[in-house]
Amino acid sequence: CEPGEVVTALGVVETAQVESSGGAMQRQRDARMYDIYLNVVSVVRKRGAGEGGAAPGLSAAAAAAFRRGLPDLDAEDAHFGRANAGWLGVPGFEPDVTDAPEMSPSDLEFIVRFTEECAGEQFKHLVHSLCPTIYGQDMVKAGMLLSLFGGVRKKLRGSGDVPVRGSIHCLVVGDPGLGKSQLLKAASGLAPRGMYVSGRSVSKAGLTATVVRDAATGGYAFEAGAMVLSDGGVCCVDEFDKMPNEHAALLEAMEQQSVSVAKAGLTATLPARAAVLAAANPARGVYDRSRTVHENIKMSPALLSRFDLCFILLDVPDEERDDKLSRHVLAPHGTGAAPRLTEARQELLAHRAHADSDDDDDDDD
């Protein structure tokens, strides 16, 4: 096993009395304290793609449903010119997949059934299902959804196996009160391995990794931060503008997808293949359109270039729309939340349709 790998440990949980070397009162307090440890019998490393382990067989109904929804990959390759031209039509690229997705027959059956029911609108349904309590912001939700799906980490042959990251980093900058934190919370809850941290209370070690000393044994060990713990998932960082001193710690983790640690005689490179979803407020409280993005949030161009998607949210005053938005925000609270939320959403949709029709009439004039 290497540092940062996911393992499954099998053993017996045991306790041991804490050793004390202090005075009489300290020994008396430590006499009632115990350390809990795991007496490990076996350690199994999580297998990656192509490392054995046959997938479970499909049931008859699931196999039939999967065959109905199985795409014609050969026809797609011929249509897009990908046949015999490397991975995804790019010569020299190979997928660098380390973790194979674990899907049960019921998962495959649900995927096919969902595809058949949506009738080509799968992505639209997924966007609307992400944090439905926040009205609108479809483009932001679509970007976060793409970050949740992520890409594929690749390597280019003939260039020293230079890896190309597959994670999609997303930055949301906008005026306060537009639901940025709720969107990050929803994204971190959906991801199988998602971490949510706030820029007000996070440090460099909390974001990446550090070396700590074990009080019981006196040895040193690695302690993973949010980026390492969310390896293979997403790391949501709220209040990104409140942590200017920690921005430099993310440069390596966001581009190289790893965290290098060299402390107390220990040297290791921990994997941090996670997508970063960040939300920030403007430095002056309100987004200034006359300034650039890194001037509004005081971010260096080097860090800004790490983000693949950047969304700017503006709070445009509109009395009628703000009134309906307030009803939509208050609808989930109290009794009868579901019907009131549906009614508030319908009012917002009607107002949006009316505003769009007025814009079309102005364009015709």
Image (cartoon, rainbow, N blue to C red):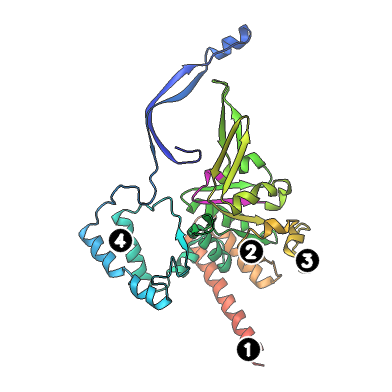
Tell me the element at label 3: loop
Task: Tell me the quadrant of the picture where the N terminus can be found.
Answer: top left
Mark 4 or mark 2, which is nearer the start of the sequence? 4
Residue tagged 2 = 310
Mark 1 or mark 2, which is nearer the start of the sequence? 2
Residue tagged 1 = 361
Disc 1/disc 3 C-alpha distance (Å):
33 Å
Residue tagged 4 = 109
- Of circles 2 and 1, the one toward us is 2
Disc 2 crowd, CA 10 A, few/some/many (<14, 14-19, 20+): some
**Coordinates of residue 345 in the picture (x, y in percent):** 53, 68
Tell me the element at label 4: helix
- Of circles 1 and 3, the one toward us is 3
Mark 1 or mark 4, which is nearer the start of the sequence? 4
Task: Tell me if label 3 and label 2 are in contact, CB under 8 Å.
Answer: no
Q: Write the start and end of the magenta stretch as one range.
A: 228-239
- The disc placed on residue 288 is none
Tell me the element at label 2: strand
Residue 136 seen anywhere in this rendered image of the structure: no
Task: Tell me the quadrant of the picture where the C terminus can be found.
Answer: bottom right
Given the image, on which type of amino acid does mark 4 rest? Answer: Glu
Given the image, on which type of amino acid does mark 1 rest? Answer: Asp
* Apparent side of residue 257 relative to residue 98 in the rendered image (left or right): right
Given the image, on which type of amino acid does mark 2 rest? Answer: Cys
Given the image, on which type of amino acid does mark 3 rest? Answer: Arg
User: Residue shown at 73%/46% (left/top)?
Assistant: 245
Disc 2/disc 4 C-alpha distance (Å):
35 Å
